[in-house]
Image (tube, rainbow, N blue to C red):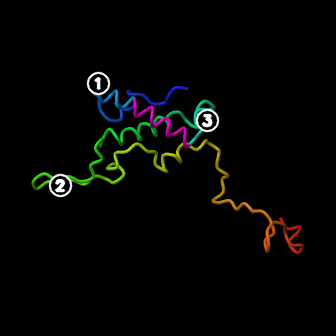
Amino acid sequence: MTIPADLTDLESRFRPLSADEATFANALLDDAWAILLSQRPNLEAQIDAGTVPEGVATFVLSAMVLRVLRNPNGVKQWSVDDYSETRDSSLAAGSLYVSPEELGLLVPVGAGSGAAFTITPGNDGPGYSTTLPTYLTGWS
């Protein structure tokens, strides 16, 4: 599978890129895809199967790369004369990473249990039992 995002996706979300920026952006897209695949090894198969929409993967890859393109030097705060600006710390990082929220978008459709939480019993150990006491049997 090819990377779901390309320069056109970045430019439509940002601005036209110069030749040097395009070369840098392509390298960042490759790196971002490698990062995503390290976090979600089955991502390619899930996109192919349609359980993870390709558009969502494109969005996540674009967001990762645009963080770097918008702030390649990682500037958090700067001032000139009487003007000063502080960037959002997530943008100021200027580094290539996938946020927990973005990673959460890449969960296959229908992968959740539908419950608010799940309790999985562990192995029986001293003082712990995963079997019901006799007075609770028959309850449903």
Q: Amino acid at mark 1?
A: Ala
Q: Position of residue 108 (x, y in %)?
A: 61, 42
Sequence-wise first label, 1 or 2: 1
Residue 96's quadrant in the figure?
top left
In the picture provided, is 2 more to the left or to the right than 81?
right
Q: Pointers 2 and 3 in contact (CB under 8 A)?
A: no
Q: Residue at x 65, y 44 (%)?
A: 110
**Foreground residue among 103 and 31:** 31
Q: CA distance from mark 1 to mark 2?
A: 31 Å
Sequence-wise, which precedes: disc 2 or disc 3? 3
**Count of numbered marks:** 3
Q: Main secondary structure of the magenta part?
A: helix
Does residue 82 appear to the left or right of 125 in the view shown?
A: left
Per the image, the residue denoted by label 2 is 84
Judging from the image, what secondary structure is the residue with disc 1 in? helix
Task: Give the residues drawn in magenta, as a range.
Answer: 27-39
Q: Quadrant of residue 45?
A: top right
- Locate residue 60, reporting x and y percent: 46, 40
Give the mark nearest the N terminus, 1 or 3: 1
Residue that numbered label 1 is attached to: 19
The residue at 32%/53% (across/down) is: 88
Which residue is depicted at the point 14% across and 54% down? 83
Secondary structure of the residue carrying tag 2 is strand
Q: Amino acid at mark 3?
A: Gln
- Tell me where residue 124 sits by quadrant: bottom right
**Residue 101 in the image, given as x and y percentages of width and height:** 48, 50
Amino acid residing under circle 2: Ser
Give the labeled residue for mark 3: 46
